[in-house]
Amino acid sequence: MTVRPQSASLLSPLATPYSPADGERRTAVLPEFASPVPERLLTPLQMKALEQAITARMQSSRNGRERASRLRLLLIFLLLRWQALRLAEALNLDDRCDFRLDEQIMLVRGAHERAISLPPELCRIVRRLLNEPAIQSLRGSLCALDAGFLRRSLYVCAAAAGLPGHLVSARVLRNSRAVELCRQGLPLPVVHHFLGLTDAERRAFLQYSPEDALRITQEHLRRSMARRTSARNVFAGRITALRRQEFLVDVRLATAAGLEVNALITEESLHRLELCEGRIVAATVKAPLISLEPDGPGGVNRFPGTVRRIRSADFIEEVDVELDNGGGNICALLHPLDCAPALRLKGARAVASFKAFAVVIGLL
């Protein structure tokens, strides 16, 4: 007898896999690392393709026994992919007592015993899986799959997703998730705890170059500042020069992406903020103070990029420009008469610019 999958109750959440926060889907990830780990990694898109292949395989089950087996495979994969478990840790889980879904916590047994959080969406998916009629007789040992069967099944699903088999091992999934968490701004000690790393493993994990560390720190600070101000455009950077011009001070700062920002502030503000060369600050510019012009050279307060989104309202247009070389996004609010029609097309090349007086310097 063919068993029809309960797509409405179980698979709908899997169509849009959970992420740490809804806002994270709309925020650019942290800059790429030079050499994050020696092993090969899966990108988020590749992992999503693999998840969809495993889900499709489960949907095509021909009978109850096959469905139970593939539901167990899906559960193990979700734990390897999102919780970054070691294979032995995943296979050793007791589904009756190690999932504390009401508390959104999962207990990991073994040499690296720990409690780690279960994101709300993953909790809902796991709850639906555990309530599937096809696997009720296996409760208590759902995760105790044969390791060889698990690997062979993952290879089959990898082929269906167009991925080479060596990229779907538990180790690659674990490392890929770890790097993903770091790029989303989770502090490294928290990632260490999440993975259950030993001291020796911590020393070998994610060797950052000084340039990587600077980029990550500045991007994290930029996001933090963006949450505290209504300004759409925030540039976190290090002050490279302070030049006094009578009662004004010319402040130059460089961002992690290599952008040069120039601000003019009063000498009183300089003393009140205790600014000095080398200090990391946030430069904010409100969107109505951004100008757009046809593509041209970059420079101080001039940032070339590509128009990615245009939204129109009465007598106002919002234009988002993705800056070159990983410089982030910049948003301009313009009157239609102040922006050439050629610049109001998705994919158009443009230079976003602003005056030094438009920049507000804030402390981080």
Image (spheres, rainbow, N blue to C red):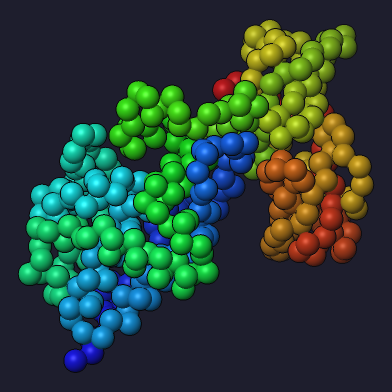
Instruction: Locate the N terminus and report the quarter of the image it occupies.
Output: bottom left
Query: Residue 74 lies in what quarter of the image?
Result: bottom left
Q: How many marks?
A: 0
The residue lying toward the viewer, choosing from 350 and 317, is 350
Q: Is residue 271 visible?
A: yes
Say whether residue 87 is left or right of residue 64.
right
State which quarter of the image contains the C terminus.
top right
Which residue sits at x=21%, y=34%? Answer: 111
Seen at 30% across and 53% down, the residue is 79
Rendering coords of residue 87 (x, y %): 29, 49
Which residue is farthest front?
A: 148
**Please, is residue 103 above or below residue 284 in the view?**
below
| Residue occupying the point 40% across, 54% down | 169
Regarding residue 127, the answer to whether it shows in the image is: no
Q: Nearer the viewer, residue 142 or 312?
A: 142
Q: Position of residue 357 (x, y in %)?
A: 80, 28
In x, y percent, where is residue 57?
35, 76
